[in-house]
Image (cartoon, rainbow, N blue to C red):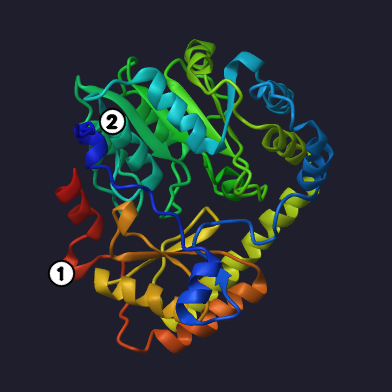
Amino acid sequence: MKIHLPPHIASLKPYKPGKPIAEVMAEYGLTDVIKLASNENPLGPSPKAMEAVRRAIPEIHLYPNGGKSLREAIAKKVGLSVDQLIAGSGSEGVMTTFMRTFFSPSDEALTSAGSFGGFYVLAHAAGLNLVLAPMKDFAYDLDAMADRITPKTKLIYIANPNNPTGSTIGREAFESFYEKVPPNVIILHDEAYYDFALDVPDFYSLLTDIRANVVTLRTFSKSHGLAGIRIGFGSGPRELIEPMLKVKLPFEPGTLAQAAGIAALDDDEFLAHTIATNRAGKEYLKKSFEGMGIPYIETAANFFCLPFLAEQDAKQFTDEMERHGIITRWLGGFGLPDCVRISIGTQAENERAIVAMKEILPANLVISNGVGVNGINPLEKVAAVTG
């Protein structure tokens, strides 16, 4: 007897993470490869988190307490109550619980073209009908999104700052959009890159702004350097958090992840060093791009999005950078096939990337001016096809 998968699972395209270093070494016969593809912390993990993991190892024969200790630590740190917080295996773990808790197959989810590819995968895996609004100047077009809200809309996803374009949404823009969202529609506000946007004027965090229909996500993967241990959390009103706690895996997150997260919360020195390194790297890359005549999208995160004139050029650039031992990210899975994302690394890594780009770009790899071919915004083309 043949087992039949549900149609939305059979047709699902899995999320593809950035290539690992070992794979690129084997593919090109290289011995020195750096990864600037997945927005990881170039400084490594939080030292306090590493020490906490070492101390927690003798306890791994015991079941963890489901994130309770981490929720208590976060509540104390940010001024929320424990019942307004949920912890999970990265922000995607919390996102998965969120999907399972509130939505049924055929419910409608609204977001933007050119946003986090992982959300697209999780929405399709839940059987949701995904509606994509076009972006405007590589940022969320909240007016276009508001125009697409219908009685079928159950969920709106916003990444702020957005991955992979690095754009942000300010308080005034969000408030104007929020007034147009029906109270029975839940907004999922993803703040994975929050720490890198603190110096952006009018940047708006919703972590402690508890609203009846908003759940906010945070992760320890980026600024705290804990991507490999999988730890994140969400905040929201207890009326939304309580049912999510019923649905989540009972022992998620694990003991070591929770210990790392608690310790990282208080590693202010490492966080400050991370932000300073990112800020310096951002300025260096901007000046280098401008000196080479390479257009880029202004970013509030720890990466840059580079627009090309054609998908073929973007793919070729990615391949050529790998041949030079530098892993970047082609953005086809994010709905931006004409773009490449490059993470901000250490100064040495950034300098190496620029040297490689100077060798690669003259070889018929033409960068877009950000408008697109014949004045057509590539994001609008994507939305027309996939929305």
**Residue under the image location 52 percent in, 42 percent down:** 203
Question: Which three-letter amino acid code belongs to the residue tagged 2?
Answer: Ala
In depth, the one of 308 and 322 nearer the eye is 322
Left or right of 278 in this view: 115: left
Spatial distance from mark 2 to mark 1, Cα to Cα?
31 Å
Counting from the top left corner in percent of width and height, residue 71 is at 67, 23
Let me know if residue 116 appears in the view. no
Question: Which three-letter amino acid code belongs to the residue tagged 1?
Answer: Asn
171 up-or-down from 359: above or below? above
Counting from the top left corner in percent of width and height, residue 126 is at 31, 30
Question: Dot 1 lies on which element?
Answer: helix
Quarter containing the N terminus: top left
Mark drawn on residue 109? 2
Q: How many other residues sit within 10 Å of disc 2, few (<14), some (14-19) or many (≥20)?
A: many
Q: Which one is in front in this view, the residue at disc 2 or the one at disc 1?
A: 2
Q: How many other residues sit within 10 Å of disc 1, few (<14), some (14-19) or many (≥20)?
A: few
Counting from the top left corner in percent of width and height, residue 132 is at 24, 41
In depth, the one of 249 and 178 nearer the eye is 249
**Residue under the image location 63 percent in, 42 percent down:** 220
286 up-or-down from 253: above or below? below
Q: Quadrant of residue 260?
A: top right
Mark closer to the chain start, 2 or 1: 2
In depth, the one of 141 and 226 nearer the eye is 226
Mark drawn on residue 374? 1
209 up-or-down from 384: above or below? above
Question: Dot 2 lies on which element?
Answer: strand
**Residue under the image location 39 percent in, 84 percent down:** 361
Left or right of 286 in this view: 143: left
